[in-house]
Image (cartoon, helix red, strand yellow):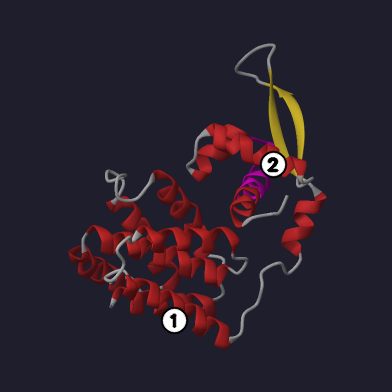
Amino acid sequence: MSLTNRKKQFLEKLMELYENSDLPVHYETLAKAIGVSKWTAYDMLKQLEKMSLLKKEYVVNNSDTGRSQIVYSPSEKAYNIFNSSSDENITVAEWEHVKQELIEMLVSLKKQKNPNVVSQRLLDNISKVNNKLILCANVITLLITYLKLSNDSKIPNIIHLFNLVHENNTKLAVFTGTVVGMFLTETNIIGIEVMSLASEHINIFGRLSIEEQTKITSFLMDALAL
């Protein structure tokens, strides 16, 4: 069983919750933090436990006398993964290739008989990529894809809002949050799973280096201008 990007996001969020509270984490707490159902969170935690990345224990639920609940804490193996340099570095040439490929996907939307082919390809990329910069670029491209399929007229307003913010990290979070917010009542256009996916990745922008934030912000502006 491999540590996919989605599993990694759940593990990282649980580690964050654990470190902030110094207490094992219940799956409902994790579900609320990520924005998924409690059953989705529980299933993911069971998979991570099987990979020896989490330790399970039973504690008494103070609000429900006599009953216990399952909680999880990160294992030493989990910390070793995040302490090692697991993020694949890419060269300038590789980054330029990724950008060109994603831009071509957006351009192809006008010619595609089935635009869902593009969004599915991006979702596949997101599930496999191990580099934060490339991951962010794919998430951004996915959101722009849904914007273009919905209504291009919304893009100028987003660009205007985007330009009012000065810090790159904030610009990226504002863009993602704005687009997801636009589609909260339009789940026929952007599925709940995709909204959840985008919401999960907002915090990744803050973990990019200053150089990476500059690169991804520049890519975002180029993609919006198409």
In the foreground, 69 or 226: 226
- Residue 16 part of the magenta-drawn span: yes
The structure residue drawn at horizontal position 34% and vertical position 50%, both measured from the top left corner, is 190
| Above/below status of 191 relative to 162 | above
Q: Which residues are magenta?
A: 13-26
> Which numbered dot is residue 37?
none
Q: Tag 2: residue type?
A: Gln
Give the left or right position of residue 222, taking residue 11 as reference: left
Residue 200 at what x, y percent from top left? Answer: 50, 52
Q: Residues within 10 Å of mark 1 (few under 14, many from 20)?
A: few
Residue at the outermost top position: 66
The structure residue drawn at horizontal position 40% and vertical position 50%, both measured from the top left corner, is 195
In the foreground, 121 or 93: 121
Judged from the image, the secondary structure of the residue bearing numbered disc 2 is: helix
In the foreground, 41 or 99: 99
The structure residue drawn at horizontal position 48% and vertical position 58%, both measured from the top left corner, is 123
| Above/below status of 204 relative to 66 | below
Q: Main secondary structure of the magenta part?
A: helix
Image marks 2 and 1: residues in contact by CB distance under 8 Å: no
Task: Report which quarter residue 65 is drawn in.
Answer: top right
Give the left or right position of residue 86, taking residue 133 as reference: right
The structure residue drawn at horizontal position 66% and vertical position 20%, both measured from the top left corner, is 61
Whichever of callouts 2 and 1 sits on the residue coming sooner in the sequence is 2
Q: Tag 1: residue type?
A: Gln
Disc 2: which residue: 47
Disc 1: which residue: 100
Q: Is residue 23 visible?
A: no
Task: Report which quarter residue 18 is drawn in.
Answer: top right
Judged from the image, the secondary structure of the residue bearing numbered disc 1 is: helix
Q: Residues within 10 Å of mark 2 (few under 14, many from 20)?
A: some
The answer for how far apart the CA atoms under marks 2 and 1 are is 35 Å
Residue 185 at what x, y percent from top left? Answer: 27, 43
